[in-house]
Image (spheres, rainbow, N blue to C red):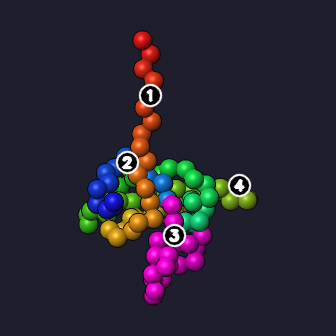
Amino acid sequence: MKGTSLRVGDRIRIIGVPGTGIAGYYIHPDTTRAYRKLIARGRSLRICEIDQDGRPWFAFRFKLSNGTWEYHRMQILPDDDNWVRVKPHQNNKRR
């Protein structure tokens, strides 16, 4: 699935670190750490913005051991395959 198919409000789950197994692909160690935390947490993330190039962005935060928050924003590149779309829950309709 391409990142360009995502819209603001869609939910995704990170399932891998981008570029894994691609020779010469560089990703900053802090970015790798953030992706590994997202994978371990297993929660879905909401697409919060589509930039002028049509790339979706998501935002997240982690609570640090000193009680403060660490904030991040990352974009999904067109060839990234480290995410899956999360289907919305179907609410049980009451009669």
Residue 13 forms part of the magenta stretch: no
* Pair 1/2: label in front: 1
- Where does the image place residue 7, in percent across and percent down from the top left? 31, 51
User: Does residue 19 appear anywhere in the picture?
Assistant: yes
For the point 43% across and 56% down, the residue is: 84
Mark 3: give few (<14), some (14-19) or many (20+) Cα within 10 Å.
Answer: many
Residues shaded magenta: 15-33
The disc, 3 or 4, on the residue closer to the chain's N-terminal end is 3
Q: Which residue is the extreme one toward the bottom?
A: 24
Q: Mark 1: which secondary structure? A: loop
Q: Which residue is mark 3?
A: 17
* CA separation in Å, label 1 and label 2: 17 Å
Q: Which residue is mark 4?
A: 67
The disc, 3 or 1, on the residue closer to the chain's N-terminal end is 3
Q: Amino acid at mark 3?
A: Val
User: Does residue 69 appear anywhere in the picture?
Assistant: no
* CA separation in Å, label 1 and label 4: 35 Å
Q: Which residue is mark 2?
A: 10
Q: Which residue is the extreme one toward the top?
A: 95
* Pair 2/4: label in front: 2
Q: Amino acid at mark 4?
A: Gly
